[in-house]
Amino acid sequence: MKQLLHALKLTGMLVLPLMSGCSSESKTTGFWEEMQKEAPINTGPQRTGEQVYHYRCEACHGKNTQGAPMPGDQYEWGIRAQKGMDVLMDHSLNGFKQTMPPRGGCLDCSDEELHSALMYMLNQDEIHFLDNTKP
C-alpha cells in the first residue's frame, strides 16, 4: 500500500507541473488548421528542392503516408508522371483529394521552390514523361 501511495505522489509531482501550463488560451491546433493559416511567401534566398523536401515534403513522402510516393519509387512516380508535369504542379499548389494539403503544407514556399521540390523527388527516379522527356 505504501508503494502505491508513493507511486501516486510521484505521478502527481510529474503530471501537475505539465498541466499548469495548460489553459484555454494556449490551445494547440491540429495539422489541418495549421495548414490553413496565412503565411508570407519566402522572399529570402530561394531554397533548393532538396531543402524544401526535407523541410516539408519528407513528413509524408519520406514514409509513404496515405499514398504519398517516396523518392526512389519508380513505379508510383511513373504513374503520376503519365498525367504530366502540369497536373503534378497543380496537385502541389492546390492540394490533392484530402490527403495532400495545398502547397504541400509549405505555405511559405514560392511556386518555384515547390517546383524544385517536385523535381527533386522526380529526379531520384530519373522519371520520363509520356513524350520521353525528363521533367
Image (cartoon, helix red, strand yellow):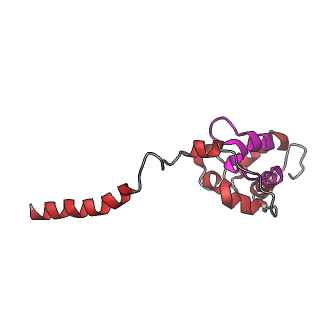
Q: Is residue 4 left or right of residue 43?
A: left
Describe residue 97's horizontal placement relative to residue 87 as left or right.
Answer: left
Q: Please state which of residues 13 and 93 is positioned toward the viewer in this rendering.
A: 13
Q: Residue at x 86, y 43 (%)?
A: 130
Q: Residue at x 74, y 62 (%)?
A: 50
Q: Let me know if residue 95 is in the magenta part.
A: yes
Number of marks drawn: 0
Image location of residue 75, percent across then percent down: 71, 48
Taking 97 as reference, is 28 above or below it?
Answer: below
The quarter of the image holding the N terminus is bottom left
* Of 66 and 105, the residue lying toward us: 105
The residue range painted magenta reads 88-115
Residue 11 in which image quadrant: bottom left
Q: Is residue 110 magenta?
A: yes
Coordinates of residue 86 in the picture (x, y in percent): 84, 41
Q: Residue 100 sits in which quadrant? A: top right
Residue at image point 70% right, 42% down: 102
Query: In the picture, residue 85 is in which quadrant?
Result: top right
Q: Residue furthest top?
A: 97
Residue 106, position as x, y percentages in the image = 70, 51
Q: Name the side, left or right, on which 62 lies relative to 108.
A: left
Image x and y of residue 25, in percent: 47, 47
* Residue 26 in the image: above or below residue 7: above
Q: Nearer the viewer, residue 124 or 50?
A: 50
Residue at image coords 31%, 58%: 16
Q: Nearer the viewer, residue 134 or 31?
A: 31
